[in-house]
Amino acid sequence: QVQLVESGGGLVQPGGSLRLSCAASGFTLDYYDIGWFRQAPGKEREGVSCISGSFGSTYYADSVKGRFTISRDNAKNTVYLQMNVLEPEDTAVYYCAAVRISAVQHWCTEYEYDHWGQGTQVTVSS
């Protein structure tokens, strides 16, 4: 089975931190590009951060650059998203997604990704 399971979401005050985890099963993340996406009510899904499975290069949306960090633990077949200095605008359902690597690098956009987790809710509110 190919499965991605997110965890780590919850309610946090502005300025707080959360670490999201994306555990993969049925395939090894070494051969996949991994992305974190989020969708708030009334807004389209956007790419937050992506990491290349071939070279390890990373992408961050301008809105989270300097606050969020994406990383992987190959031994655990898990990808993380460390979120610091959270803002109310970060409130959304966060999804982990994967796509097999190819000769052409994938853009950090939902249309490029094949496998998706079910999402985890992140709420930033005082």
Image: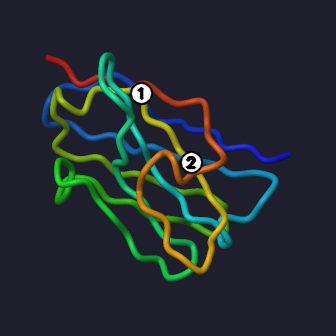
Label 2, on which residue?
A: 97
Image quarter in which the C terminus is found: top left
Instruction: Estimate the x, y position of residue 40 in percent, counting from the top left.
Output: 32, 24
Mark 1, residues whose alpha carbon is within 10 Å: few (<14), some, or many (≥20)? some
Q: Is residue 121 left or right of residue 101?
A: left
Q: Which three-letter amino acid code belongs to the residue tagged 2?
A: Ala
Q: CA distance from mark 1 to mark 2?
A: 13 Å
Image quarter in which the N terminus is found: top right
- Residue at 42% from the left image edge and 51% from the top image edge: 109
72 or 101, which is in the foreground?
101
Q: Which three-letter amino acid code belongs to the residue tagged 1?
A: Val
- Residue at 26% from the left image edge and 41% from the top image edge: 17
33 or 68, which is in the foreground?
33
Task: Name above or below for residue 29 compared with residue 1.
Answer: below
Q: Secondary structure at mark 1?
A: strand
19 or 90, which is in the foreground?
90
Instruction: Estimate the x, y position of residue 95 in percent, counting from the top left.
Output: 49, 38
Q: Secondary structure at mark 2?
A: strand
Q: How many marks?
A: 2
Q: Is residue 126 left or right of residue 119?
A: left
Instruction: Estimate the x, y position of residue 70 in percent, counting from the top left.
Output: 39, 60
Mark 2, residues whose alpha carbon is within 10 Å: few (<14), some, or many (≥20)? many
- Residue at 37% from the left image edge and 29% from the top image edge: 39
Label 1, on which residue?
A: 93
Q: Is residue 52 left or right of residue 115?
A: left
- Residue at 41% from the left image edge and 57% from the top image edge: 108
Q: Quadrant of residue 29?
A: bottom right
Instruction: Estimate the x, y position of residue 7 in percent, counting from the top left.
Output: 53, 36
